[in-house]
């Protein structure tokens, strides 16, 4: 039952990210650290449904990544970039869609033109 709730949170968050059209609403949605908490969560890689939804979630986040929104994905406390580190394991996935999502996330992250 808890797995179903977690899965629904990931699905709903990805859907919201894809459909937010107002920049102010996007900034409000991303501005708390809850998104980074969802990104950092470790899931059972053998759970294919969760794995595919997690990769879709990360891809949806990366599509919203630009030089302005990048600040919301930086974890100042640990001096890390959770979106980048969470996408790396997707490259080893046996699921081709998850691997492609992982590559898309990494390409979006490294393609940001931000001097910081």
Image: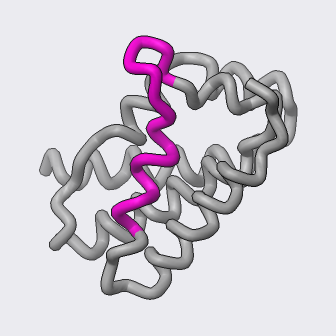
Please report the residue visible at 34 percent of the width from the left and 62 percent of the height from the top: 89
Question: Where 108 sits versus 71, above or below?
Answer: below
Residue 49 at x, y percent in the picture: 30, 72
Please report the residue visible at 29 percent of the width from the left and 41 percent of the height from the top: 41
Residue 12 at x, y percent in the picture: 50, 49
User: In the rendered view of the protein, which quadrant contains the C terminus?
Assistant: top right
Please report the residue visible at 63 percent of the width from the left and 67 percent of the height from the top: 104
Residue 94 at x, y percent in the picture: 31, 85
- Tell whether 100 sits left or right of 80: right
Residue 68 falls in image quadrant: top right
The residue furthest front is: 115
Give the magenta part as a residue range: 75-90
Q: Nearer the viewer, residue 7 or 69?
A: 69
- Tell whether 81 sits left or right of 10: right
Residue 63 falls in image quadrant: bottom right
Question: Where 81 sits versus 11, above or below?
Answer: above
The verdict on residue 89 being magenta is: yes
Q: Nearer the viewer, residue 56 or 112?
A: 112
Question: Where 89 sits versus 73, above or below?
Answer: below
The verdict on residue 38 being magenta is: no
Residue 112 falls in image quadrant: top right
Please report the residue visible at 26 percent of the width from the left and 46 percent of the height from the top: 5
């Amino acid at each position: 039952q808890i797995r179903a709730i977690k899965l629904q949170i990931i699905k709903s968050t990805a859907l919201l990210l894809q459909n937010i059209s107002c920049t102010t609403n996007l900034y409000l949605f991303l501005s708390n650290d809850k998104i980074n908490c969802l990104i950092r969560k470790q899931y059972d890689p053998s759970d294919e449904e969760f794995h595919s939804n997690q990769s879709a979630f990360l891809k949806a986040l990366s599509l919203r990544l630009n030089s302005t929104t990048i600040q919301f994905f930086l974890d100042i406390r640990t001096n890390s970039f959770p979106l980048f580190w969470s996408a790396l394991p997707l490259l080893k996935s046996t699921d081709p869609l998850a691997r492609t999502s992982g590559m898309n996330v990494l390409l979006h992250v490294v393609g940001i033109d931000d001097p910081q």
